[in-house]
Amino acid sequence: METIVSGARPTGRLHLGHLHGALKNWVGLQKDYRCFFFVADWHALTTDYATPQGIQQSSIEMATDWLSVGLDPQRCVLFRQSRIKAHAELHLLLSMITPLPWLERNPTYKEQIKELVGKDLSTYGFLGYPVLQAADIIMYKANKVPVGVDQAPHVELTREIVRRFNQLYGPIFPEPEVLLTEAQRLPGLDGRKMSKSYNNAVFLSDSPKEIDQKLSRMMTDPARVRRQDPGEPEKCPAFQLHKIYCTADEIDYVSKGCRTAGIGCLDCKKVMIKHVIAELAPVQEKRAALEKRPAEVGDVLATGNRVAQEKAAETMDEVRAAIGL
Ligand code: SF4
């Protein structure tokens, strides 16, 4: 069975954007691959080193959502990056062989420095985070890494580092391939990308009432100022959710209703909202059960940490021997 490695920064409770962006894909992958999914808590520090207070709680919240959506600890290894110290050792060793220009040309490095205003990101850790990512991936000898198009250059950098390592010290690591994820980009309530930091998210753990209230307020085609104004569904952020959740007949019905002003936006959204609530019902049932057994999530991570630890120790034995340490 081929191995897959992927991780996510601990952002706390997850939302619909995460569900459609990565989680559904992960749940599918665990059937066909040996999967290692990790809470990337050290990565969180690369940008949030000044405010680390929430990381512990956010890690547990995120892992709870992972289990709620169907990641199965019997099929995949769920663990916390910071518990496997070997990631730090491999990161250090890879940093010895990674030329600085490979990191400086990373497009997301420059973009994020511009975007994340108010944070001093002129740090060694932030520049080097793709090297840490490479260590995370190759530690488990991943054959494939599921990513969206925007993350593909990072995997390419990992491949370059692997080639250099193997050339210098011998063929220890496979070159991981990109497994492109066809993620659906979900708009948030205000039409921007759904994100906790924009305060525009529908969380997987929101109650049906909260989901209904939030989505009823979601931005629509600005042309529909009054009920009798016709609209254009493709200009409406809420309609992006219809396209994901509704049947072909329902999409047809609301599209016609919108263009002819035959239905109001609230009635239109109701058609979609019922599907969102239905999709999340089993997720929330599982979450409620997990919340009654608070130790369970910690136990799952502890078991995953042990499995990851064993595999990482094997890899590092090989690495040290190859380098002659
Ligand atoms: S009727 Fe539906 S598709 Fe049209 S603007 Fe309103 S919510 Fe959007």
Image (cartoon, rainbow, N blue to C red):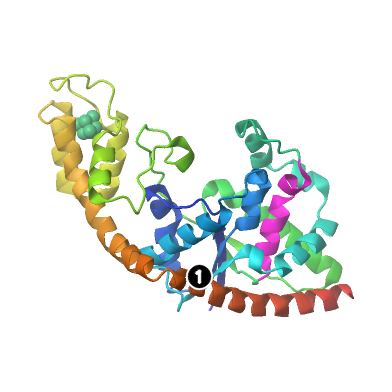
- Which residue is disc 1 drawn over? 298
Is any atom of residue 151 visible in this view? yes
Is residue 211 shown left or right of residue 113? left
Q: Residue furthest left?
A: 262
The image quadrant that residue 71 belongs to is: bottom left
Can the viewer see residue 175? no
Q: Nearer the viewer, residue 54 or 126?
A: 54
Query: Is the residue marked by circle 1 packed among few (<14), some (14-19), or many (20+) residues within 10 Å?
Result: some
The image shows residue 136 at horizontal and vertical percentages of 66, 63
Q: Is the stretch drawn in magenta largely helix, strand or loop?
A: helix
Figure quarter occupied by ligand 1: top left
Q: Nearer the viewer, residue 49 or 99?
A: 49
Horizontal arrangement in the rendering, residue 251 relative to residue 185 (left or right):
left
Task: State left or right for residue 230 relative to residue 142.
Answer: left
Q: Residue at left 39%, top 37%? A: 200
Indicate the position of residue 311 as horizontal and vertical percent values.
65, 78
Q: Please say whether residue 137 is one of the residues in the magenta stretch.
A: yes
Residue at (77% x, 66% y) in the render = 89
Of the residues shown, which amino acid type is indicated by label 1? Gly
Q: Residue at x 46, y 58 (%)?
A: 61
Compared with 109, 143 (above or below) is below
- Give the residues drawn in magenta, as a range: 123-139
Give x and y (percent) for residue 131: 73, 55
